[in-house]
Image: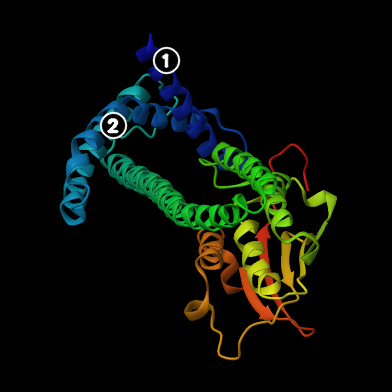
Amino acid sequence: MALVRSAIFIFLAWTCVGVFLAVPDTFTGFHWPMLVSKIIDAWAWALLTPALLLIDRKLSSIEQNIVRLALLLLLLSIPFSLAHTFLTGLLLYAIPQIWWNPLLRPDFAVYFFLGAWQTFSALVGIIYAFKHYNRFLTSRLQLERVEKNLIASRLNALRLQLEPHFLFNTLNTISSEVVTNPNVAQGMIGDLGALLRQSLDCRDRTEITLAQELSLLEHYLSIQRMRFGDRMEIGIDIEPETLSILVPPMLLQPLVENAIRHGIEGRLSGGKVMVSAWRAGDQLQIRVLDDGVGLPPNWRMDASTGLGVRVARERLAALYPDLGEQGFVIRRREGGGTEVAMSVPVHSDGSDEA
């Protein structure tokens, strides 16, 4: 049944080709013999199509050798053109009104042979152009899959670097409160457990919504509020329409931790950390600011960057390479302190388009 459907499809396709080729002749007046001649010419190719497909399959093993393939196709074009000329003549023989039969006159035979040779060459060109284009698309898709796997592996490796670093710092904070403030330490442990539970939920995801990221950050801030009390002031200014935009998980925590360390920890009077986010065109703009001592004069991104900040920068670079260096910038604030500026391409989880 499948063979019959294939045969019907081949004949219908070639019939359409024949009708299409006969269209220019209608401008000089309709001549049904010309239309029939074009269709019969196409049907002859329909009869030869299985042989064409068979040869294409046989020659697939030498497609990499272009010279050898071209020579073989050139040789095959002669018997194919002869076969097409003969088949066309046989089919036209049944219609006496069509007098330009290649089997009746040598000059017609040459004309049909050259036409068949041109058609064979065009068919071969189309087939191999399509095959090479298909291979190009396949290899491109494979390359994209490999690149995505590499990015996922790199992100996972960066996250594995970040988690022990975060846990060490947080547990060190909790341990300092266990003896002097056991109730505070107990609250810290509860927030740490909630934070770890949420981070495990998104372990296999390269992106989460900004709302989920802020929920992770809030557990971390709860721990720090218990530690610093009134010495720490945290400001959160997030545009509501940005909450569904996707960002890498655990992106804000290491940056806020870095801001607390440099903006609050070493100062008796404490300090302020500000986290803000808004949409600017097709990008989400994120800022983490502190009012600490600021960057030293000789500070450089690669040489003086801590692990948490470096990992955040590398994760953004891996996920959004098109942003370049503007995707993650650290600079001094004019009024004192440090500003971390990040850009993330806008795309959402689909539940609420930002």
Q: CA distance from mark 1 to mark 2?
A: 16 Å
Q: Dividing the image into 4 quarters, which one contains the N terminus?
A: top left
Question: Height in image: 199 above or below 7?
Answer: below
The foreground one among 337 and 72 is 337
Q: At x 75% / y 83%, what residue is drawn?
A: 336
Residue under numbered circle 1: 5
The residue lying furthest to the bottom in this view is 297
Which image quadrant is residue 77 in?
top left
Question: Height in image: 124 above or below 90?
Answer: below
Q: Amino acid at mark 1?
A: Arg
Q: Would you say residue 295 is visible in this rendering?
A: yes
Mark 2, other Cα within 10 Å: few <14 / some 14–19 / many ≥20: few
Left or right: residue 341 versus residue 31 is: right
Residue 103, x across and y down, in percent: 27, 31
Residue 78, x across and y down, in percent: 20, 43
Mark 1, other Cα within 10 Å: few <14 / some 14–19 / many ≥20: few
Q: At x 33% / y 46%, what residue is drawn?
A: 128
Looking at the image, tell me whether mark 1 or mark 2 is earlier in sequence order.
1
Q: Would you say residue 103 is visible in this rendering?
A: no
Residue under numbered circle 2: 53
The residue lying furthest to the top in this view is 1
What's the colour scheme? Answer: rainbow
Q: At x 39% / y 19%, what residue is drawn?
A: 6
Per the image, label 2 sits on a secondary structure element best described as: helix
